[in-house]
Amino acid sequence: MGLIESIKEKAKLQLRTIVLPEPEDERVLKATQQVLEEKTAKVVLIGNVETIKSDAAKCGANIDGATIIDPKNFENIDKYIDELVELRKTKNLSREEASEIMTSEPRFFGCMMVRLGDADGLVAGSNSPTADVLKAAIQVIKTAPGINTVSSTFIMETADGKFGDNGLILFADCAVIPEPNAEQLADIACATAATAASVVGLEPRVAMLSFSTKGSAKHPLVDKVQFACEILTDRNVNFAFDGELQADAAIVEAIGAKKAPGSKVAGFANILVFPDLQSGNIGYKLVQRFAGAEAHGPIVQGLNQPVNDLSRGCSVEDIANLVAITATQIK
């Protein structure tokens, strides 16, 4: 059984409610049908009921079984507006402004559903920029306790099974933070460890990557990674980590034993935390193309409750897969 198939089986065990706030996109409507048929989640669509049903009929999507909510006719809208006013009181958001946001911006409405427990997670981005999705998530759902950083990870699935855990290895951050500082790198490590455990079922072994291994090079960029490791030590995290490590020392047993003897992670890492977005983004794409690996993601992490962002070039299958992944992120 492949990774996505196993994630879908896991999602079926606890049927979560996932909001899809962009039903104007026919791919979302067709993905809704697939999710309902596969029974990986309950689906909430946001928008005008008649318009959504009409659009579904036009594109041949059977969305019977999905819940459709129109914010303009939602009985608890005052509760949602009041909550947004409270959340944004330091920004002096008026009730009128909050009402406009809640009734006209479905990503904000959907995130409020998640915040207030009316849904478990949200998937958006097929019809909107990443910045818009993350803005709603950060302002409404906020970051997880002890985490101040929203980041992302890709689950890399390689065919030969040589690295990570039977070919599964997580790369972070590959999509969100261009130049993370040491504190942010530590947050990324913590969030990715949580993703590895909840979504994939792995026991995290985190390698904090650099161009240096255990002081083999001196540079401020190396210092940053070393400081991130000190922060993780101070936090007394409940997962194995080590750094700074070069990539080969992190994933090749013989090299790890030589360059970092005694390490519980070197040579056996199943999570690679890259020192910046450039290296992470380039790295996952090289592995995807050169090694023919499947890159599942990006999975957004570090939020108090799960929200995930789609590529605007996504397929129906991509949306359905990310719904299942989102469902398994829920604690």
Image: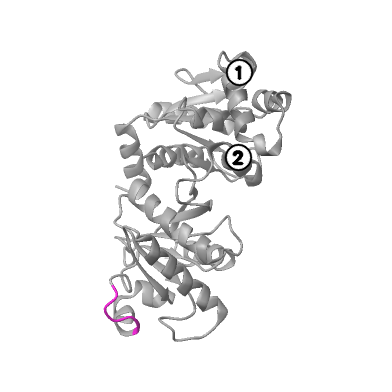
Mark 1, other Cα within 10 Å: few <14 / some 14–19 / many ≥20: some
Magenta span: predominant SS is loop
- Most foreground residue, 308 or 219: 219
Disc number for residue 16: none
Name the residue carrying label 1.
Answer: 78
Give the image location of residue 288, x and y in percent: 48, 61
Count how many numbered circles sit on residues in the image: 2
| Residue 254 forms part of the magenta stretch | no
Q: Is residue 311 visible?
A: yes
Relative horizontal placement of residue 10, taking residue 24 as reference (left or right) = left
Q: Place residue 309 in its image quadrant.
A: top right
For the C terminus, give its image quadrant.
top left
Q: Which residues are magenta?
A: 259-263
Whether residue 139 sits left or right of residue 321 in the image: it is right
Q: Residue 139 has which mark?
A: 2
Horizontal and vertical percent position of residue 199: 36, 46
Rounded to the nearest angstrom, the CA distance separating label 2 from label 1 is 18 Å
Indicate which disc, 2 or 1, sits on the residue closer to the N terminus.
1
| Amino acid on which disc 2 is placed | Gln
Q: Residue at x 54, y 24 (%)?
A: 45
Relative to 113, does residue 194 appear above or below in the rendering? Answer: below
Q: Amino acid at mark 1?
A: Asp
Residue at left 35%, top 43%? Answer: 7
Q: Residue at x 69, y 25 (%)?
A: 104
Q: Is residue 25 visible?
A: no
Secondary structure of residue under mark 2: helix
In this view, 233 is above or below 143: below
On the image, the x and y values in percent for residue 111 come to 55, 33
Q: Residues within 10 Å of mark 2 (few under 14, many from 20)?
A: some
